Amino acid sequence: MKCLPCGQDNASSALFCTACRRPLVAPTKLPTRLEPLAQPAMAAAAPAMAAPHGGGRAEDFQPSRNRFAPPNAGRTSRLGADGELLTDGEAWAAFIGGSNTDYYLERFERLANGDSGGWNWASFFLRVYWMLYRKMWLSALIWYFVPGFALVALLLVCAAIAKAAVPFALIAWGVGYVALPGMKGNAWYYKHCEKKIRAVRARGGSKDQMLARIEAAGGTSGIALILLAVFGIIALIGILAAVALPAYQGYTVKAKVAQTMPVGADVAAAVGRQYEQTGQLPGQNEVDNFVLQAAHHSTYVTGVDLDGTSGTLTVHVLAPPVEGTYQMVPSADNNHHLSWTCSSPDKLSRYVPASCRPDGAPTR
């Protein structure tokens, strides 16, 4: 018989449509399947009906059942006109999906019988990511935030009661945080599965409809893989930044220090000329004038000092984030001609040119 509202074909003996659950009415002008009118409400509500004076049994006069009433709640798992029921195994398999179905079916069977669900390695290693993969959104949120708050509360209590117990509290929390997901992962997933299946069964419908709703509620999600990929990319960027930023900083400091080398050379040449002409080293004031009159200038040179005894020039360099000095050391011949040697004994030796770097000094 065809259902007029939805067009579903049904068995000729069916009373309700298997698709929309509406009453089926024969396509005739007069309803041929109507039952006799029900007894009055007062009579139907009476606990028992007395037999009429004419005799007979009271149960023969009970009002007949209304065949067009919706099915009761106890038949929400009915799958169709054939009376087949949705089994727990079918519901579990539909909810788990195609990922490790046999593994979880075996664990669910054990849990349903009151046994332990066993150890779950995926939950042990991945924790929140495994919960997200299995669409356990609330569990993932709880497990992400609650352990941190629990640790803080535990430390506060231990610090207030017995400070010596703080290390033991940390060890206990760490063991629980690491081991508990592996021990209880299957049980958590089973409870989550059962809760969703009960909600689907309560809505009723055909077998195909319930299986479709169970599959939509269960299965796996790709959000965990997306988060792993995102965090992996972030970690990779962090590693590259940790390697590249110091190298880049070293190159910038080298460039700044390289700008100061011509200034030191110009001042050393001016001092050498004066010594060659007069046989005496200039004073500090004259050295300061040499700096101002030098052909090269650099904002990274903060000053040049002259050692009046040895004639060594100390060039002070401020090349953020590095600050240091390098020295121009003279050596005179018989004609009072000065030859200069560059050296950098302090931390600036990492950034000066190779000719100004002591043997064995590290480079960047």
Image (cartoon, grey):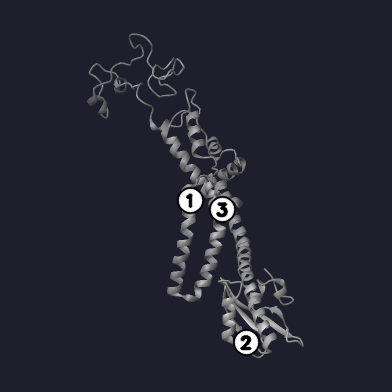
Q: Nearer the viewer, residue 218 or 246?
A: 246
Which amino acid type corresponds to the residue marked 3 in the rendered image? Phe
Residue placed under numbered mark 3 in the picture? 231
Left or right: residue 7 compared with residue 296: left
Task: Answer few, some or many: residues within 10 Å of disc 3's Cα (few below 14, many 20 plus, some between 14 and 19).
Answer: few
Looking at this view, name the residue that lies furthest to the bottom.
Answer: 309
Q: Position of residue 95 (x, y in %)?
A: 53, 39
Q: Position of residue 117 (x, y in %)?
A: 57, 49
- Which quadrant of the rendered structure holds the N terminus? top left
**Label 2's element?**
loop
Q: CA distance from mark 2 to mark 1?
A: 80 Å
Is there any visible trace of residue 233 in the rendered image? yes
Q: Position of residue 34 (x, y in %)?
A: 33, 15
Q: Position of residue 100 (x, y in %)?
A: 61, 42
Task: Answer few, some or many: residues within 10 Å of disc 1's Cα (few below 14, many 20 plus, some between 14 and 19).
Answer: some
**Label 1's element?**
helix
Task: Answer few, some or many: residues within 10 Å of disc 2's Cα (few below 14, many 20 plus, some between 14 and 19).
Answer: some
Residue placed under numbered mark 1 in the picture? 139
Which amino acid type corresponds to the residue marked 1 in the rendered image? Ser
Q: Earlier in the sequence, mark 2 or mark 1?
A: 1
Q: Quadrant of residue 318?
A: bottom right
The image shows a total of numbered marks equal to 3
Please identify, in this view, whether the residue under mark 1 or under mark 3 is nearer the observer: 3
Please identify, in this view, whether the residue under mark 2 or under mark 1 is nearer the observer: 2
Q: Earlier in the sequence, mark 3 or mark 2?
A: 3
Q: Earlier in the sequence, mark 1 or mark 3?
A: 1
**Label 3's element?**
helix
Q: Residue at 47% of width from left, 69% of height from top?
A: 155
Q: Nearer the viewer, residue 349 or 336?
A: 336
